[in-house]
Amino acid sequence: MTFSDVTASAGAWVLENGHRALLTVTGGRFPKKLLGMQTIELHTVGRTSGLRRSTMLTAPIFEHDRIVVIASKGGHSDNPDWYKNLSATPDVEVTVDESTAAWTAHTANAQEKAELWPVAVKANPGYDGYQSKTDRDIPVVVLTPRD
């Protein structure tokens, strides 16, 4: 693990836990948006533990019937655990404004990513910087409501 990997991991940890602390302290009222993006809490099933895991994320694309999140992990060399979990079990839950609903996740194929990536980068130019820091192709995840 390189210094930049440790720095990216630490930054991701601070963002995740700092955001969760703000939600706890404010009773879920702040922040609804971060860097202009909708904040969501993604609930996955741990791929080895089978336990429910929750992660705070920002969604550069947030629509009634589609949420898009980026598995950037700050440009770390490995995919985030939440992404590994939803890859193993794509049935997830998303909490927004204290309301939780069932969604299904899939990794965008090349054509979908070509369409979605520029929109995500427009919402958060940092994604391009994260991509330039790593050799992995940062996954774009599309969530759709589960019936």
Image (tube, rainbow, N blue to C red):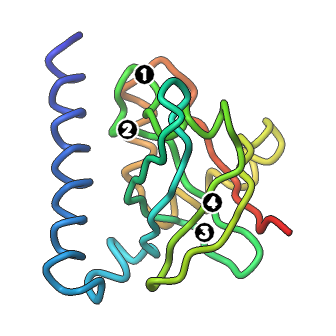
Vertically, is 60 above or below 139?
below
Q: In this view, does 113 lie to the left or right of 15?
A: right
Disc 1 is placed on an element classified as loop
Q: Do the residues labelled 2 and 1 touch (CB within 8 Å)?
A: yes
Residue kind at label 4, given as amino acid type:
Val
Residue kind at label 1, given as amino acid type:
Asp
The answer for how far apart the CA atoms under marks 4 and 1 are is 20 Å
The answer for how far apart the CA atoms under marks 1 and 3 are is 23 Å
Q: Do the residues labelled 4 and 3 touch (CB within 8 Å)?
A: yes
Q: Are marks 4 and 1 in contact (CB under 8 Å)?
A: no
**Where is mark 1, residue-wise?**
78
Q: Are marks 2 and 4 in contact (CB under 8 Å)?
A: no
Q: Residue furthest front?
A: 50
Residue kind at label 3, given as amino acid type:
Ile
**Where is mark 3, residue-wise?**
61
**Where is mark 2, residue-wise?**
73
- Residue drawn at x 66%, y 33% is 87
Q: Is residue 2 left or right of residue 46?
A: left
The answer for how far apart the CA atoms under marks 4 and 3 are is 5 Å
Mark 4 or 1, nearer chain start:
4
